[in-house]
Image (spheres, rainbow, N blue to C red):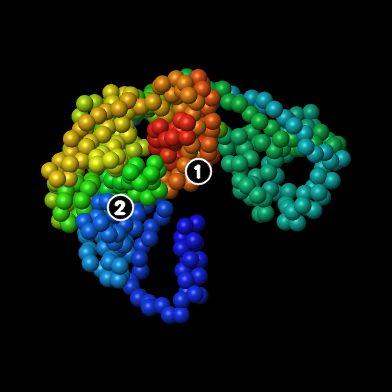
Amino acid sequence: MKARFFFLYGVMMFMTIPSLSQKVTEPFDFGYPDKPALSIPKEFSYTGVPCLMMYDSQDRNILKVYDDNLDEVKKITMKEDIPFRYQLTYQDEVRDVISVEEVQKVQFVEYSSYVEFVEKEKLINPNFSESELVIVELGGGVRRISYNYSECKDCYGSNYDFYFGYATLDKKYPKVYFIDGGQEVKGYRAKYEAQYSAWRSEGTRVVDCERSQKRIRLCNINLNQGDGEAERYFELSQTLFNKDASYEYIMPKYKLGTSTGLPNGSLPENYGEIITSRSYIISEPNEVVLEGFQIVSESGDIVSDITFGDGFECNSGDLGSAYVITMGAKTYLAFDGYCNGESATIFYKIDNTLNALQKVKIAPSSMKVSPTILKRGATIHVNFVDGNQQGSDIVISSVSGVTMQRVKRPAGQSSVQIPTQSFSGMYCIGRYVNGGNKETKKIIVK
């Protein structure tokens, strides 16, 4: 929407100004709204004047800095994503299908004879052939008719769609079938349920895993300018951590931890209606967490190496971003995460005169959100640690600030369940009390 506004604004200016100079450059990579901003925030710029910053069109590890004449004044090659390699141990289990029961059958059509059934099928599909049918004799002159969708030329769907547990049970339990009783033919839609044996062990296995350690994006929140929420992230800064004109950025430090405190549960290997195998993660620790960060200079040197400590870790939903919060003359660097299993936020006071960061506070969270990684349609559980005595508005928004869902919770109600309606991506869950933002968490929808 903003890009469209700038385009229309440019068209209006072109129509009202007699002449315009122009400049042709190599392609710019503007990225997306949830990607880094096009400029360092002016409060962290050496000159206090914004510069245009763009990724190199061929390499997103290169940032180019342009002045107000669109001349390139700096090219900065930042560290590439660092792979974090680790191993997880899984316990594999299997079970057998003992029986399948038809739990629902609804008639949807009726024909006077098998001949009429075939005629109507040909009317619907001129390429219909009786060779596409799967006919099972049920005894007493009664037979069940269904389709073999892999043989059907113009059928919509597949055997996986129209047979219960097709991958395991083949074409034994059709969801749509016809009963030919010798005279009339009736069509039904059916539902089934399976009964299983107990799970039994199939041994353990070790899996090699890898997670990319990407540069940490910084969300700028300058309360002196009334920015309670920022819509853009930035990666490079000049005077955030020191007073000189050189550039710095932040790289993460990962480890295996257990920050979320959530049970691992089981991960089915064969998703679908019939589940006969699953795996548990049994290794501890098993959760990739952010244990700290490094401030890196434009030349690639490590300026500061920080480990959170005190039992604080960032969970997998918060590995890629942090907050820069300016209040009065003080600026803080903040990370959301968990402290000894409890939701919390850690704050560092930045002294750019001494090029130093001082850990000042680990603030307990007033809002707990679980899970932080979920599928679309899954339920988000939000609990208010403070009891929600004043009432709250819960707002789910994209990282670019677009509101996706809003739920009001009256005073005294200390929890809320929200079915997520968002597409895949990262989202913010903000808690607003009396109109002000009290706390924000992140979730990832897969």
Left or right relative to 265: residue 176: right
Q: Position of residue 338 (x, y in %)?
A: 31, 28
**Figure check: 412 above or below 126:** above
Residue at 29% x, 40% y is 327
Question: With respect to residue 325, does 3 lie above or below?
Answer: below
The residue where tag 2 is placed is: 41
| Front one among 136 and 199 | 199
Q: Secondary structure beneath disc 2? A: loop
- Specify the amino acid type for callout 1: Thr
How far apart in space, not on screen, are marks 1 and 2 (Cα)? 24 Å
On the rendered structure, is 229 left or right of 51? right
Q: Which residue is mark 1?
A: 403
Horizontal and vertical percent position of residue 137: 72, 34
**x 42%, y 39%: residue:** 428
Residue sitting nearer the eye, 91 or 284:
284
Residue at the spot 31% in from the left edge and 57% down from the top edge = 39
Number of the label disc, if any, that sits on residue 79: none
Q: Which of the marked residues, 1 or 2, is nearer the chain's N terminus?
A: 2
Is 444 on the left-hand or right-hand side of 115?
left
Q: Going 28% across and 40% down the picture, which residue do you hit?
A: 328
Q: Position of residue 298 (x, y in %)?
A: 18, 55
